[in-house]
Image (tube, helix red, strand yellow):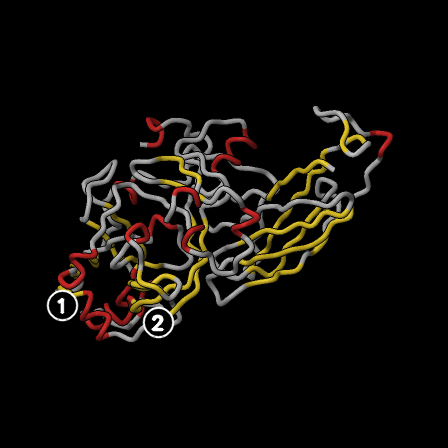
Amino acid sequence: MGKTDLRVLGQTPLNAEPPCLVELTKHNITPLHLAYARNHSVIKDLASEFDSYTVKIDGEMEGMEEKVLNVKDMIASFPRKVVVAALICAGNRRAKMQENTGKEVRGIKWSEGTIANARWGGALLRDILISAGIPEQEDAQKGFHVCFASNVAPCEDDTCYGGSIPLEEVMAKDGAAMLAYEMNDEPLTPDHGFPLRVVVPGYFGMRWVKWVDRITISRNESPNFYQQRDYKMLPECVSSPEKAVKEELCLTLACPDQKTLKVTGYAYSHCPISRVEISGDGGETWHEVRITYQEGNWSWSLWEGELVVDIDVDALEWASHGQRNGRSKTKVTVISRAFDQSGSAQDTDCRWNLRGVGFCGVGVGSVEV
């Protein structure tokens, strides 16, 4: 991953996103050089340890077997499955939340590029856990959590990185949670978790633990800092860390051509997107656009459309640079909203939270014509 491909917001640990959303949304599957980087620790190159790399599986569930799984044996023993799924940082569009609300949010001021739609290859977690004695009956799974941990490197706020999700979601027969060793049909790179990372479609990226080396079945959520103390969508009354003690739908806009605006973007949620609409009059009227790409249940949706805007020349205000091509310029604002198959839609109002996560406001883009 070349630094010229991404806009770097932090060097150590490396945190960076693609600078051009128009370029990002040209690709159904995000190429590696445009995949954002989000880290809470240094990036470890574990190529020399691949042959001996293991994942420990343990826990407190009756009847389960403690296992130490060698990654090479895992690849050989379990069927390779492939899922197309969008990896999304919970803080995607955090800067926009701050801009829209006028209230400070804590964390890296991400723009709209912390999303990567990739083809992940690996072994289903369901298959691995069944081999360790986890029962397939749903009633037996209730109340338990699958805790993921990476002890490869100390993190900014904890000795290791960890997170968890409910066991019944990992064990769902139609689920796609996996231990991935491939990204876009190639082995994972160090910055994306080589040799092994968690992929849990439908969850934000903080649960997709990289360099995973331990999986624990527990009656409690992961005790890790990044599960218990971070990435919380706090109520608006929580305005400081001292007071602190879901889905997402997003888009970005491309460039217009005079009075006819070509608008493109992306949207995502915990289930497929059913439609996307755009408006050039502040939401008074809406126009449905065309979804150009959607793959399976977990990918992003790319969309495009055209919007004809009426420009009242007599009412134009001069832009700061006066005239362009012999005429005055005006700013046109387009807003966009997406709906998913469950009926959820982007909010017309921007709701603030201290950590700036889970932003679900409508997309807004402005251009001069």
Residue 73's disc number: none
The first of marks 2 and 1 along the sequence is 1
Q: How far apart are the two marked residues, 2 and 1, measured between alpha carbons?
A: 24 Å
In this rendering, would 350 be left or right of 224?
right
Circle 1 sits in a helix, a strand or a loop, which is it?
A: loop
Residue type at numbered disc 2: Lys
Mark 2 crowdedness (10 Å alpha carbons): few <14, some 14-19, many ≥20: some
Foreground label between 2 and 1: 2
Please provide percent x and percent y for residue 232: 38, 40
**142 is higher (above) or lower (below) than 152:** below
Number of labelled discs? 2
Residue type at numbered disc 1: Glu
Observer able to see residue 168: no
Quadrant in the picture for residue 361: top right
Quadrant in the picture for residue 16: top left
Which residue in the protein does label 1 denote? 65
Please provide percent x and percent y for residue 243: 35, 28
In this rendering, would 135 be left or right of 368?
left
Looking at this view, is 329 or 67 the one in front? 329
Looking at this view, is 180 or 340 the one in front? 180
Please provide percent x and percent y for residue 335: 65, 43
**Residue at 16% across, 60% down:** 53
Which residue in the protein does label 2 denote? 81
Please provide percent x and percent y for residue 186: 34, 64
Mark 1 crowdedness (10 Å alpha carbons): few <14, some 14-19, many ≥20: some
